[in-house]
Amino acid sequence: MRVYELMVIFDSAVADTDIGGHVEQITATIENEGGKVAKSDNWGRRRFAYEIDHKWEGTYVVAEIVTEAADLSTLDRQLRLADEVVRHKILRLPDDEANRRGLLGVAPSSADAE
């Protein structure tokens, strides 16, 4: 079992109501790969430290992913091609950090039964 943290920065032109739909698409992609989104947190609109693609702010969303998959290449490709995504980053959490957050005990298949 592997635990990842995903941060996505959406374009500031995307409406706040549309962000939820994009997050649902990301969740569906992860679940199709056999994983589960343990937690998703919308940080809201924030100003960038520097200009990115002629933009100064975006909406940040952070998700914790638990999956058996060796990689998340499908998700990475989907996010790279999405016009509404300014930046994204997928990090594998170390096992001790995943244990501290209580994520290694979350099984993708057994969590749906609860």
Image: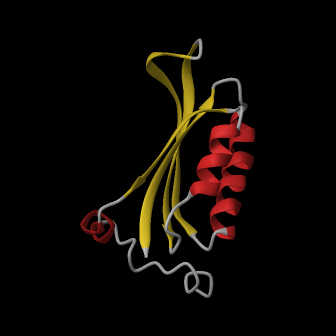
Q: Nearer the viewer, residue 70 or 2?
A: 70
Q: Residue at x 62, y 88 (%)?
A: 113
Q: Quadrant of the N terminus?
A: bottom left
Task: Indicate whether 43 appears above or below 24.
Answer: above
Left or right, residue 112 beside residue 100: right
Query: x and y percent of residue 86 in the render?
Result: 59, 30
Task: Indicate whether 92 appears above or below 88.
Answer: below
Query: x and y percent of residue 76 in the render?
Result: 59, 49
Left or right, residue 105 beside residue 7: left
Task: Indicate whether 101 appears above or below 87.
Answer: below
Q: Residue at x 69, y 35 (%)?
A: 16
Q: Quadrant of residue 114?
A: bottom right
Q: Nearer the viewer, residue 41 or 87?
A: 87
Q: Residue furthest left?
A: 96
Q: Residue at x 53, y 70 (%)?
A: 69
Query: x and y percent of residue 87 in the render?
Result: 54, 33
